[in-house]
Each structure stands twice: as structure tokens, then as C-alpha cells.
Amino acid sequence: MTTFDVRSPIDGSIVATRPLSGASEIAAALSAARVAQRAWRGVPVADRAALVRRFVEAMRARTDGIAQELTRQMGRPIRYTPGEVNGLSERATTMAGLAPEALADIATSQKAGFTRFIRKDPLGLVFVIAPWNYPYLTAVNAVVPALLAGNAVLLKHSSQTPLVAERFAEGFKAARLPDGLLQVMHLSHADTEKLIGSPDIDFVCFTGSVEGGHSVTRAAAGRFIGLGLELGGKDPAYVRPDCDFDHAVENLVDGAFFNSGQSCCGIERIYVHERLYPRFVDAFVALTKQYRLGDPLDPETTLGPMVRASAASFVRGQIAEAVGKGARSLVDAKGFAADREGTPYMAPHVLVDVDHSMRVMTEESFGPVVGIMKVGSDEEAVRLMNDSPYGLTAAIWTRDEAAAIRIGDQVETGTWFMNRCDYLDPELAWTGVKDTGRGCTLSRLGFDYLTRPKSFHLRHATG
């Protein structure tokens, strides 16, 4: 039996040890899921939605334990980890509410002598591969809509947060989900790729790196199945001179550094109109310096460690390169006692005098660093925001909604925010462009990727 250890970024201690699933276990899980799905597809959508609501209640009842466990697995401060259950609850409840209408038959125009409609059939078995940074929130985006649509689900979480998958299984068991419908497995990379290429899998939902997305695509090559890929991001923000200044500063500091910057839709680059630039930078730096870096199990800590020392080293390398090219770092890491080279503990960094020749402004950082650039016009801001291989979200701070829509129409992104960032509204499509991936989760449109249309063309008997 092959096992793996989950090491906490807090102190390197082992949080859990788990076995990897073997060939016989994988085969049994696939068989059980197939059998369960054939019955589940006939369950009314309203009953599926009621079960999801029971799942939400079961997860809420486990909030304290989930929060402690999540902090130990990936390092987010304990003062924030209960929010992951709140977000899961919002998304699952919203999708349960949307399901009856979104999954209903689509009527056509009436035609004498005929009955015609389009039904949305489930795909079968959906393979969900979830990451460690927001392990409940990313998984719920796919798991709950897939089940609501009548599919079975195979859930594999990152080896950093495998206990999250187990909590999903417990929550659905408490909600009385039929046996076999949700299969939780801890898998090696090799077995994950084999499964993607297996005829037993009908759709893959993957959240992770661009490199990981390419691996999933290669594994599925030659198969006519759908892939939902949410990959990298380098999300920009533009601060116009007519913004609500204090709100813009507060919201953008949080958007850049929450979860130690380890968010696919976190703010990684900010463009500020020249009329506000000096004042904005001063206020942004002053607020950033108020973070408390340290043990995430301490309720007073507001910035925890990154997931591992190598991730922090990567971000430090980006910063060093930028400084070498003329950038200035305005936050002295010495002001954060826990900051240590060679560890996951890293102070937040604010860089100015940056440009797009620097990796920190073009390459995904996924850490507590943000670059701030001065711009002279809306047009310049749009050009710089679009100068990226990614496009998950982008944001603008302004009081002029018409201008926000006009500018948003020109920005290459999946979600365009005004006066907020780093947020997911489950009634809106969660999608991206360019190397951020393909497909869509949540909203009514998300169900379209988890079903296939089946046309019914019925001619009435004439005799």
C-alpha cells in the first residue's frame, strides 16, 4: 500500500497520512458510481435539490471542526476559515434553487400534429479534481451542480487538503445521498491521468495551474468528452479618479493579500490614474503594514504562511527580479517578525516603479505581492489590463456605472467587477478567457456543461 503525508505549512507537522487508492478500489468505485447514477437520474430535480439543502445543513453543523482542520492543512488564519463553509452554503443553496428551472425541458414553438421539446440528460460520471487553496469552494462549484443535474461524481482533492474530500462524503452521507453516487478517492498523478482517459469518465472539472490544465487535456486526447478548466490568473484592477477612495484602498488591499494572495481571482496588479496615484500608494502601503503575519491558529493573525516554502521562494524570486530591474518595495519585511527566508512565512509586498518587462506584472504570483502602476487614461488602463495571457476577473473602482460598462466591454475577462473584487456570485457564470481555461461553472449556464441536450420529436398518430 502506498501512502502519503499531509504536512502543515504552519510547522511542518504531519496532519494526516492517507493511502492512495489501488486499481481494485478504483474499479469498484467506478462500477458502484455507474449503478447508482442509473437510478439517480430518475429522481425528480426537486428531490435532488432538497438533498443538497440537507447537505448544507450537515456541513454548517461541522463548521468549527472544518475550520480548524482546514487551517492546519493549508495555513489560512483560523479567523477566516469558517467563511469557507459559509461560501459553500451560499453556492450550494443558490444552485439548488436554480436547478428546477435550469434543468427543465425546453419547449419549442407549437406545431400542429407534433410534440417537440429538448430534455437535458445527465452526462453520467463527472470527475472533479479540486485544488488546495479554496478546497471547499472550488469543489462545491462542480460537485453540487453535477449531482443536481443527475450525474454521479468522483471527487479527488489535492494531496495538501485530502480531508476536505472526506468531509464532503460525510456531509452527503448525513444528507442521505444514495450509496455510490459520490466516490471520494486519493489518487496518484498517474492514476488520475489514466482515469481521465478511461471510458468510465464522462466529464472532467479541473481547477489548478495552466500546466495542470495541459496535462488534463493531453490525458483526454482522443476522447469526445467535455473538460471544464479553471486555470491561472493575473487579475488586474483599475482605480479611476472618481472612485470612492477609502473603499478602493480597503477592498484592494484585502483583494491582494487575503489567503496570502493564494487566490485564482485575487488582485495581482493595480493600475491607478495619475491624479490619485501618490495618495493611493501611500494609503495602500499604510493599510498593508497593519497585517499581522504569524501562526494561523492564533485568532489575532491576519496573514498566515503560504502553502509551502517553495511557493514563497518563487514569489521572492519574482520580487528580486523586479527590484533588480528598478522596482521599489515599499513594505520592509523586517517589520514582520515571522517573515523568514526558506519558510512559507512571507510578509506582504507592495511594488512600485514596475512595468510589464517584469515577471511580477505578467506571470502569476499566487502569493502576497502586488505591483502598482500609474496610468494616464482609461485607454492606457485597458491596454495594460489586456496585456496578459490570463483572463479570469478584472475590476474597476469608479462612481460612473456607464463608464464601467463601456470599459468592461473592452477588457478581456470572464468576470468584470465594479467597486469590488476577489468574489464569486453563484448566480453569475464563473468562467475565463485565454490561458485561464474554458468552460463555465455556476449560474443557470453551468448546468449546460453537465448535461447533454436530447431532442424529442413526436408525431401524433393520424388514424
Image (spheres, grey):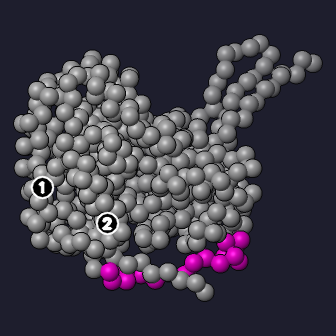
Local SS, label 1? loop
Q: Is residue 233 left or right of residue 100?
A: left
* Residue 23 drawn in magenta: yes
Residue 106 position in % (x across, y down): 63, 28
Where are the magenta residues, as a range?
Answer: 12-27
Work out whether residue 51 or residue 37 is closer to the camera in this orientation and state it: 37
Disc 2: which residue: 313
User: Could you tell me how far apart the alpha carbons at marks 1 and 2 are, in whole angstroms?
Assistant: 17 Å
Q: For residue 179, say whether it is visible.
A: no
Give the residue type at disc 2.
Ser
Q: Earlier in the sequence, mark 1 or mark 2?
A: 2
Residue 153 position in % (x across, y down): 59, 58
Work out whether residue 65 or residue 249 is closer to the camera in this orientation and state it: 249
* Residue density around tag 1, few if under 14, some if 14–19, many if 20 or more, within 10 Å: some
Work out whether residue 28 or residue 211 is closer to the camera in this orientation and state it: 211
Determine whether 325 is above or below 63 in the image.
above
Give the residue type at disc 1.
Val
Local SS, label 2? helix
| Placement of the C terminus among the 4 image quadrants | top right
* Residue density around tag 2, few if under 14, some if 14–19, many if 20 or more, within 10 Å: some
Residue 100 position in % (x across, y down): 53, 39
| Placement of the N terminus among the 4 image quadrants | bottom right
- Name the outermost residue toward the right: 463
Determine whether 63 is above or below 52 in the image.
below
Disc 1: which residue: 331
Residue beneath the point at 17% across and 28% down: 273
Numbered mark located on residue 284 in the image: none
Instruction: Examine the image and state in which quarter residue 307 appears.
Output: bottom left
- Name the outermost residue toward the bottom: 1
Q: For residue 13, say whether it is visible.
A: yes
